Amino acid sequence: MESTEILRQEHRVIEVVLTGLERVADGAERGRAVDRAKADRALEIVRNFADRCHHAKEERHLFKAMEERGLSHQNGPIAVMLQEHDLGRGHVRAMLEALPAASAGDPAAMRDFSRHAREYVGLLRQHINKEDNVLYPMAEQLLTDADDRRLVEAFEVVEREEMGEEAHEKYHTWARELAEGR
């Protein structure tokens, strides 16, 4: 299905960002102040690409289509995915709160930033695995070709309204640079 393939491709970009975020956490764990520029970029990608764009596609469109085909959002895989999205948002908020002091070299803030970065990375890697290997195959079984076409169209609207022109390319470039340590 084209809709789930779009989401899987976005997961590959998010995984690259997670690698970059790990590099930022590595530095803090070695006693270096958090690199503000790299942390800002990683968190911008996470907040805008992963959450406002990718998670919006899932929460507003994919999950709702799956519910229309009989899957509950109150328990089961959709409920787990929604809970994990919220947990991830909490870690991102905590990193944002710790960042000013962590980038100034405050040891407690560096530990907080690093801890939340590690927990976020671990959560997202497991989350992506569940979606790629459990949730999306379920969607591919439940949804019709017409559902898939509607989802792809809805995803394009999210792209335009949430991301804007050329944002994907910018975030892809930043993700690669972060993962390479640049």
Image: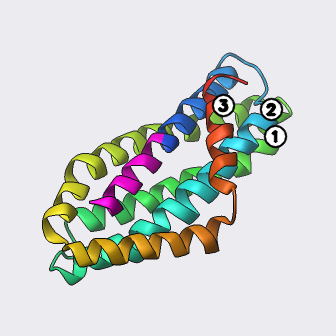
Residue 73 seen anywhere in this rendered image of the structure: no
Quarter that holds the N terminus: bottom left
Residue 2 position by quadrant: bottom left
Disc 3 and disc 2 in contact, CB within 8 angstroms: no
Graded by Cα atoms within 10 Å as few (under 14), some (14 to 19) or many (20 or more), the crowding at tag 1 reads some
Residue range highlighted in magenta: 1-12
For mark 2, what is the residue? 106
Q: Position of residue 37 (x, y in %)?
A: 80, 37
Say which residue appears at 45% left-offset and 76% top-offset. Answer: 154
For label 3, the SS is helix
46 displayed left or right of 141: right
> Comparing marks 3 and 2, which lies closer to the viewer?
3
Graded by Cα atoms within 10 Å as few (under 14), some (14 to 19) or many (20 or more), the crowding at tag 2 reads some
Q: Position of residue 155 (x, y in %)?
A: 46, 70
Residue 101, numbered label: 1
| Three-letter amino acid code at the position of disc 3 | Leu
- Cα distance between the residues tagged 3 and 1: 21 Å
- Cα distance between the residues tagged 3 and 2: 23 Å
Residue 121 seen anywhere in this rendered image of the structure: yes
Of callouts 3 and 2, which one flags the residue occurring earlier in the amino acid sequence? 2
Principal secondary structure, stretch drawn in magenta: helix
Residue 178, numbered label: 3
- Cα distance between the residues tagged 2 and 1: 5 Å
Q: Position of residue 92 (x, y in %)?
A: 60, 51
Graded by Cα atoms within 10 Å as few (under 14), some (14 to 19) or many (20 or more), the crowding at tag 3 reads many
Of callouts 3 and 1, which one flags the residue occurring earlier in the amino acid sequence? 1
Disc 2 and disc 1 in contact, CB within 8 angstroms: yes
